[in-house]
Amino acid sequence: NDLLLDKNGKKMSKSKGNVINPDDIVNEYGADTLRLYEMFMGPLQADKPWDNNGIEGSRKFIDRVYRIIVEENKVKDVENNNLEKIYNQTVKKVTEDYESLNFNTAISAMMIFVNAVYKEDILPKYMAEGFVKLLNPICPHVTEEMWQYLGHNNTITYESWPTYDVDKTKEEEYELVVQVNGKLR
């Protein structure tokens, strides 16, 4: 990829001998991790520096999602009002960002949601399913496995995209800055 830069900011190329072999990354971290990292590095058209710490961070994110869905017994068929707003905001943001090919900000929104879920004891099953659908275009292999774990025998590929409630995406409080007698309030 001629849009990748090495750690010194120079373009990576085979002739310079500074190319990262994707097969090596896939063998060590998995295809989903490589896909997530490449999409998270920044806008598609921008030059991007390769960073082995970034690939590690991508792997940790996928592992964290996997633990929440599969290992930690958080997914239950009950409500959790603490996650309603952030779930709906995440679905809205990711949907809009995918449509405009802003994958890096979509992934960032998913990371914020995962951080919120980590602080809770319960992740409602419909939110877990919706989140797995949101992550699927970037990490299809691990999300297919999570989808099966959530009790589905069919592939996630043909499932409908998650929807959001616009009323639950709105902020309840707004900070309004005004100027009175030349002073900001």
Image (cartoon, helix red, strand yellow):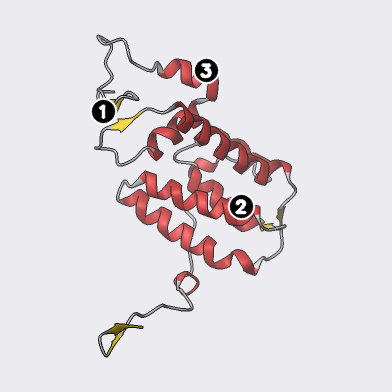
Q: Can you give x and y, in whole percent of width and height, for residue 117 in the image?
A: 62, 55
Which label is found at residue 27? 3
Secondary structure beneath dot 2 equals helix
Q: Residues within 10 Å of mark 2 (few under 14, many from 20)?
A: many
Q: In this picture, is 149 found above or below 115?
A: above
Q: Is residue 160 visible?
A: no
The residue that label 1 is drawn on is 3
Secondary structure beneath dot 1 equals loop
Q: Nearer the viewer, mark 2 or mark 3?
A: 3
Q: Is residue 35 visible?
A: yes
Number of numbered discs overlaid on the protein picture:
3
Quarter of the figure with the N terminus:
top left
Amino acid, disc 1: Leu
- For the residues labelled 2 and 1, the Cα–Cα distance comes to 35 Å
Residue at 63%, 69% in the rendered image: 81
Q: Can you give x and y, in whole percent of width and height, for residue 115 in the image?
A: 58, 52
Q: Can you give x and y, in whole percent of width and height, for residue 31 in the image?
A: 49, 26
The residue that label 2 is drawn on is 128
- For the residues labelled 2 and 3, the Cα–Cα distance comes to 28 Å
